[in-house]
Image: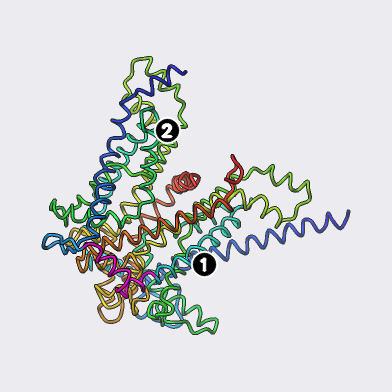
């Protein structure tokens, strides 16, 4: 008895210690690349190539950030990306809520089959549709405009529809019934009851939509040609091509530019971590 | 209530609300799929009108084009390592995070952070990390006395480099696994404790079946995503400027990268459409295969093994 009561806390403490050891070790592995990026972004050209590397540079080279922002029209790209993102988020989220309302609050012939079709398109690899869409947008004269990036998003996205529908289904139908008895139209129920109650789910969808629009690379890559119309991600890639093609690679400037591009991501992540986790899990629990 | 249901059933207004999706589905999914199918039987540079050539694209792809085999092999290599390693690692991290410890939320945030970033910025960061002489990785290896490889500049190590990088961004899968672990009713473990079950037995007989649906979901999504690997390879491997993506010696020419080059650098739209259909069929076959295999190992609570 006495040995048991003495070993148990010891085993507990040991297990505790091992857990923290692994947690800290893995954290270091995950964090080091980011710290390396930030440290490099503040080095001089000699600093990034110094052996051994000094993690804290002697003189913090803040002008790397200024260089990164003048080598490409950075402010312009931020503006471009913001405009595109706002259009995609506003239009896409609004129509996704409409569609989710239709799929969750009405009964009509073929509803479940149509919803199944909507879910199935999530699995469709984009490569199958991208070439005809490119041809279509070229015919419409939309190449080198933002329309190919924005217009398809305005019709809602299957993942957001799925996520919102799941949430709408959890809202008691008695609310709708009471409102119907009071003579409210279905649209009014959507606007004044469902949407306000679904704020947490809408927040999740907005966060996902923002990340999708802000970080999209493929669509701007194929549709945008003009230097000044590029998005932030596209601009970062062209800065990379410009710097890597020219003699000794200015990694410090490239890292400064990468840090700048990542700042909104990290901010949104810390502000909306709960929404991320919720969204990922609603998607995952479907499995 | 039945009356209400019946009234709902006749509610044609529902069609009105799903209309945005339906129009989008016709214009941006179904229509393009049909067009893409026909395009795959043509030769078309977009400059002249398309020319019907029957199965010629497909016979070229399957029999004669050496880069198709190369890019399929590269993709298979990537999928074969990146998917199992990613799943094992995300499960391991989820198990590590599924403990009641002070500050565990902070660790979860740290592990999750790299996966919600910008892939182009992250790719540029890893180009620098993989720099043979001055990059973080080879500096660290040298510190332990190992001379690191050339990574992205080596035909042998370019794919392992991209796989290593993919493991840094497994946070999403980890979060799904963690939610599955936390969804297991504690009564199951308590009952097993009463029976005197050991840790491993509890893992195999309670944890494993209970998280198998999440594991399966991760497997499917990770696999579909890995078959379509593009951005990292496009950004990181164009060492000799535009058109050189997939270097060195096409060792990072993945299938979608090859498709992109055919469509948007060489404007062979018919050929690229045929490539897209081949990819679609491959992904579909592997997904169906996984669904079939899943009957043997995925446990769904409601109906037992189904």
Q: For the C terminus of chain B, which image quadrant?
A: top right
Residue A29 — which label?
Answer: 1
Q: Is residue B120 above or below residue B216?
A: below
Q: Is residue B12 above or below residue B262?
A: above
In terms of depth relative to the viewer, which is nearer, A272 or B205? B205
Give the colour scheme of this rendering. rainbow
What is the chain identity of the residue bearing mark 1?
Answer: A
Determine which residue is flagged by label 2: A168
Residue B59 belongs to the span the image colors magenta: yes
Q: Are marks 1 and 2 on the same chain?
A: yes
Q: Is residue B54 above or below residue A151?
A: below
In terms of depth relative to the viewer, which is nearer, B30 or A186? B30
The total of numbered circles placed on residues is 2
**Residues at marks 1 and 2, CA–CA distance in whole angstroms:** 40 Å
- Magenta region: which residues? B54-72
Q: Secondary structure at mark 2?
A: helix
In percent of width and height, residue B184 lies at 62, 45
In percent of width and height, residue B62 lies at 33, 69
In percent of width and height, residue A36 lies at 43, 70
Q: Residue at x 34, y 61 (%)?
A: B278
In terms of depth relative to the viewer, which is nearer, A248 or B268? B268
In the picture, measured across the screen, residue B297 lies left or right of residue A232, that is right
In the picture, measured across the screen, residue A274 lies left or right of residue A184, that is right
Q: Residues within 10 Å of mark 1 (few under 14, many from 20)?
A: few
Q: Secondary structure at mark 1?
A: helix
In terms of depth relative to the viewer, which is nearer, A146 or B71? B71
Q: Give the mark nearer the N terminus: 1 vs 2.
A: 1
Q: Residue at x 37, y 70 (%)?
A: A42
Q: Residues within 10 Å of mark 2 (few under 14, many from 20)?
A: many
């Amino acid at each position: 008895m006495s040995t048991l009561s003495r070993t148990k806390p010891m085993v507990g403490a040991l297990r505790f210690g091992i857990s923290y050891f692994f947690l800290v070790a893995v954290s270091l592995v995950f964090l080091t690349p980011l710290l390396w990026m930030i440290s490099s972004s503040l080095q001089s050209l000699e600093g990034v190539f110094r052996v051994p590397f000094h993690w804290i540079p002697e003189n913090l080279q803040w002008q790397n950030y200024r260089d990164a922002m003048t080598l490409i029209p950075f402010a312009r790209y931020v503006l471009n990306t913001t405009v595109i993102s706002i259009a995609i988020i506003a239009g896409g989220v609004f129509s996704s809520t409409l569609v989710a309302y239709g799929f969750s609050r009405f009964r009509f012939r073929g509803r479940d089959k149509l919803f199944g079709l909507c879910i199935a398109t999530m699995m469709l690899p984009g490569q199958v549709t991208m070439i005809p869409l490119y041809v279509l947008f070229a015919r419409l004269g939309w190449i080198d405009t933002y329309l190919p990036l924005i217009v398809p998003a305005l019709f809602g996205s299957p993942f957001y529809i799925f996520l919102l529908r799941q949430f709408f289904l959890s809202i008691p139908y008695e609310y709708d019934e009471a409102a119907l008895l009071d003579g409210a139209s279905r649209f009014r129920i959507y606007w004044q009851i469902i949407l306000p109650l679904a704020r947490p789910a809408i927040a999740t969808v907005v966060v996902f939509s923002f990340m999708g629009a802000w970080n999209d690379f493929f669509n701007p890559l194929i549709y945008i040609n003009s230097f000044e119309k590029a998005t932030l991600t596209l601009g970062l890639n062209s800065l990379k091509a410009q710097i890597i093609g020219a003699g000794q690679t200015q990694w410090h400037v490239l890292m400064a530019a990468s840090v700048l591009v990542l700042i909104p991501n990290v901010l949104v992540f810390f502000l909306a971590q709960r929404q991320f986790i919720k969204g990922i899990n609603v998607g995952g629990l479907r499995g | 209530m039945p009356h209400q249901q019946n009234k709902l059933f006749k509610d044609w207004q529902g069609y009105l609300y799903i209309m945005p999706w339906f129009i989008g589905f016709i214009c941006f999914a179904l229509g393009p799929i049909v067009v893409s199918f026909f395009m795959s039987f043509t030769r078309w540079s977009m400059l002249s009108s398309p020319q019907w050539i029957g199965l010629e694209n497909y016979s070229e792809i399957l029999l004669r084009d050496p880069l198709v085999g190369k890019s399929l092999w590269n993709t298979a290599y990537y999928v074969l390592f990146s998917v199992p390693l990613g799943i094992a690692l995300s499960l391991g991290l989820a198990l590590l995070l599924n403990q009641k410890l002070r500050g565990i939320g902070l660790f979860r945030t740290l592990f999750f952070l790299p996966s919600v970033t910008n892939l182009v910025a992250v790719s540029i960061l890893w180009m620098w990390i993989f720099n043979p002489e001055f990059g973080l990785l080879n500096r660290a290896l040298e510190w332990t006395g190992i001379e690191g490889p050339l990574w992205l500049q080596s035909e042998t190590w370019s794919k392992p480099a991209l796989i290593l990088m993919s493991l840094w961004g497994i946070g999403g899968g980890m979060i799904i696994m963690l939610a599955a672990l936390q969804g297991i009713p504690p009564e199951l473990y308590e009952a097993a404790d009463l029976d005197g079950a050991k840790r491993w037995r509890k893992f195999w007989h309670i944890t494993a079946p209970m998280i198998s649906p999440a594991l399966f979901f991760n497997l499917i999504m990770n696999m579909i995503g890995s078959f379509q690997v593009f951005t990292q390879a496009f950004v990181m491997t164009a060492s000799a400027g535009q058109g050189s993506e997939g270097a060195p010696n096409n060792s990072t020419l993945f299938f979608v990268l090859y498709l992109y080059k055919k469509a948007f650098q060489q404007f062979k739209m018919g050929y690229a459409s045929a490539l897209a259909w081949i990819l679609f069929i491959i992904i579909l076959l592997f997904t169906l295969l996984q669904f079939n295999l899943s009957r043997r190992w995925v446990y769904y609570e409601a109906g037992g093994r189904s």
